[in-house]
Amino acid sequence: MSKECDYCGFRDPMPFTCKFCGNPYCYNHRLPESHNCSGLALFKERIHDSGGLYNYKPDQMVKKHKKPVFKPLGNAISTIRSSYSLTILIIAIISFFLSMVIPGYFFYLALYPLDIVSRPWTLVTSIFLHAGTMHLLFNMMILFFFGPELERRIGGKRFLAVFFLSGIIAAIGYSLWSIFIVGSSVPAIGASGAILGIFACLAVIAPHIQVSLFFGPPVRITYVLILLVLIDLIFGLLFGLTDPIARSAHLSGVVAGVVMGKQIKKMGQYIDY
């Protein structure tokens, strides 16, 4: 079946489909380098983020009889380079235990809405604090299952941008809601806003992904996102000011994730598969 070349417009009876960007090309522009493939650049970025190598060197060979050497620092650095999602998860767990043994740790890193100007670092540090084991477990479970998936699709640097910007916007949204609507300065902690931003961004970029809820039949990730938003809205209206959960932070994180997801998709800065 003939198709128009996405680069020159020539209708080729036997078109080639680029494995990096998925677009059809004629014989002359079939190679990624011949049509300025945006997917190839993103693929290289992913390989770089994962610590992969393009150039083979003979002196990098490891003899079969040579025993492997355990290098804790080297292994840790390799893990950090290969998965930002896993690194964030590890930092959050370490921070949780530190908050239980270091006096003043929680107070110094938690977000207090009225002190947001004098303590701007808490916009980020509060993301790595959690109120209890279940709070930590729930957030890290979502990050573990959906963080690497988004990271593979958009690359490590964009993943970090989505995570931290969603978390910061969630913190600002909560602070504005607390000060101007609720009239309180209850501290906020947790990565929920950032993680819901990750989830929302993934739902925009890959809406066809199927998610199983509570061992039920799989449904599209977009439906799950809508359900989570409805839960926050309904419970926020039902419990109002007595609700202990920062619904405004959740919703702010979702909005941030959706906006960034749309921008990434518009610019074609992702890999679809």
Image (tube, rainbow, N blue to C red):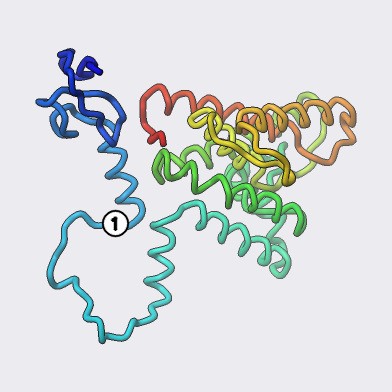
Up-down: is 139 above or below 63?
above
> How far across and how far down the image is residue 246, in percent?
76, 37
Residue 108 found in image quarter: bottom right
| Foreground of the two, 85 or 218 | 218
Relative to 259, 253 lies left or right: right
For the point 59% across and 42% down, which residue is it? 120
| Residue 144 visible somewhere in the drawing | yes
| Residue 171 visible somewhere in the drawing | no
| Foreground of the two, 8 or 261 | 8
| Foreground of the two, 77 or 20 | 20
> How far across and how far down the image is residue 258, in percent?
55, 27
Instruction: For label 1, count other residues whose C-alpha is less than 10 Å away and answer few (under 14), some (14-19) or many (20+).
Output: few
For the point 79% across and 41% down, which residue is it? 186
Up-down: is 249 above or below 119?
above
For the point 43% across and 62% down, which residue is it? 79
Q: Residue furthest left?
A: 28
Relative to 73, 128 lies left or right: right
Q: Which amino acid does label 1 sit on?
A: Gly
Quadrant location, the C terminus: top left
Q: Callout 1: helix, strand or loop? A: loop
> How far across and how far down the image is residue 205, in percent?
48, 30
Relative to 169, 27 lies left or right: left
For the point 62% across and 41% down, which residue is it? 118
In the rendered picture of this protein, how many numbered marks are placed on residues?
Answer: 1
Quadrant location, the N terminus: top left
Relative to 268, 124 lies left or right: right
Q: Mark 1 = which residue?
A: 52
> How far across and how far down the image is residue 211, in percent?
62, 39
